[in-house]
Structure formats: structure tokens, C-alpha cells
Amino acid sequence: MQPKHILLTTDFSDHARAAYRCAAELASTCGASLYLVHFAGALPSLLPAESRDTLFDSLETVLTHEAKEHPAFADVRVEPHLQRQRWTRVRQRELEENLSIDLIVMSPRGRTGLAKMLLGSFADRIVRHSSVPVLLVRQSDDETFDPRTVLVPHDFYDRPQAVLPAMRWLNRQFNSAFRFLYVYDPTWAEGRSVRGMQEQFERAVRNVKFLSVEERFAKVKSEDLQGLDVTLETAQGYPSEQVVTRANHMPADLVLLATRDGLGSVSRKVVSDAKCSVLAVPLEKDE
């Protein structure tokens, strides 16, 4: 992972602007192009053609001014990019492809008016459907993005291939230390996760020799994580709650997690409740 084309979303709110400095710093450090994108939403489609054109002209003016004049962009070139239609998954994917985007940066608290009330968080939807990593920035305008401690939730049944490129990039750019977290889920221990088959499930578990979490971590560390500062900690409870609790109490500077198209309960909880920034890396369909 080495971003060369960064997409930064804005709705012109202070919440959205909180991500500007981070995106600008990353663009400057990585030598990346930075696109400032605003989705016009559903409102223009409800207006007469003349009023709709006037609205688009106003939005173009505001977006261009934002890209040129906001203090966070003083040292980088920002290309404004107005999306004249409402957000959809297809339009998001087309935008990522057309602009060769390899990283999206945004605030997790951006607003999208009526669409937010009907469809949920805009950040949630962007993360759920993105084909590229999404960095959700939680920091004040005067803070530098410097993720020295990174929490990585993982179950170690598979190698952490999805997050490895991001880990190596974070190590190169920020000398990050990585704290893997494995959560013992009580629903598995009690067999409740296999409905109607609790007895068979418990019998199968007793008859199979599993590597311990520590053994699986040691194997991954020796085979995939050479040269990285990595440690393991474990917790007992529901994964979605434990990941957020650990992130907020370590404290972590960043949570790095792999996400599937559809956004499971852990990812959704982390996106909404973690107090630190979150870097969500999409899993490939065959992972």
C-alpha cells in the first residue's frame, strides 16, 4: 500500500473539515494527488432545471474555493470534484475507478441530510462498499496524523494478508507498533453460534486438536510479520464490544481492520464508536 491518488470527501461541515489536514499531510508525504469530492445529494433532482443549474454553479464555486483557500491545503494541490448526483454504491465504485483512487480519507461524522436518516451513516456506507482502503479520521484540526500504536483485531485462522500491505506502509511512514487483539467469543465456547447443532458442535470441538491462539500468532509472526513491532493480547467477550473497549482504553491511535462487503457487526461498531481513527481495508472476495 502506497497511496498515489487520495479521495477526500466533504459536506462543508466542521466535522468533514477535521479530516482535511490528515489528507493533505498524506498527499504531501506520499506525493499523491488529492481530490476533494462533494456529493450533491438527491435535492437537485427535485428542482426545476434552471434552479438545478444555479445550485450546481454555486456548489462548484464553493467547492473550488474550499480546495484553494482552506488553510489545511496551503502546501498541496487539491483538485475539486463535484458529483452532481446522489451517492450510490455504483457511483462510488465508478469514481474510485475513474480517478484511480487507492485511498479514501473522510470524517466518520459527516452529514448527508435526509439520506443519513433513511440510509444510515455516510461513512458506514462508504466503508461498506469501497474497493479501496478507507481512513476515517478522528482528530482535531491542530493534530498531526501520527499512528504510533495500531490495534489490529484478528482471529488467526487465516493469515492477515488483507492488512499486511497497510501494516508495512504504516511501519515505513510512521514507525507504528502493532497490537494484535484476539477475542474469545462466549457464543462459540457455549456452542450457541451453531443453532440446533450444539451437541454435535461440542463433540467435534472435543475431538479436534487446535493450535492455541498464541501458537497461531507465533506462526504468523515468524512467517508474515518480520521486521514489524508486533505483540498479542487477548480478551474475553463479544468481539465488537471488546475491540472498541481496547481501542478506547489503550489508548490506540488507529484501529486497522479488514472489512467484507456488507460490513459485519465488529466493523460497524468500530466505525461508529472507536474514539481513534480507523483504517478499513476491504477483503478480496476470495479471502
Image (cartoon, helix red, strand yellow):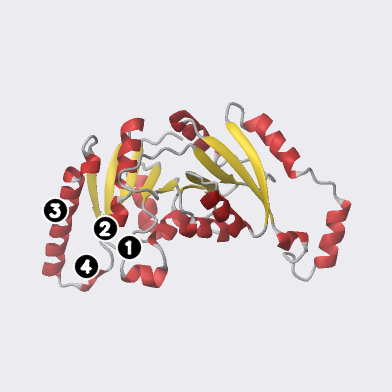
Type of amino acid under label 1: Arg
Secondary structure beneath label 4: helix
Of labels 2 and 4, the one closer to you: 2
Of labels 4 and 3, the one closer to you: 3
Type of amino acid under label 4: Pro
Secondary structure beneath label 2: loop
Query: Which residue carries the number 3 mark?
Result: 61
Type of amino acid under label 2: Ser
Q: Earlier in the sequence, mark 4 or mark 3?
A: 4
Q: Are marks 4 and 3 in contact (CB under 8 Å)?
A: no
Query: Which residue carries the number 4 mark?
Result: 44
Q: Quadrant of residue 217?
A: top right
Instruction: Give the residue at x 40% y 59%.
Output: 89
Q: Earlier in the sequence, mark 2 or mark 1?
A: 2
The answer to whether residue 25 is visible is: yes
Question: Going by the image, does 75 lie left or right of 89?
Answer: left
Q: Position of residue 227 (x, y in %)?
A: 58, 26
Of labels 4 and 1, the one closer to you: 1
Instruction: Give the residue at x 15% y 49%.
Output: 65
Query: Which residue carries the number 2 mark?
Result: 13
Q: Position of residue 108 (x, y in %)?
A: 39, 56
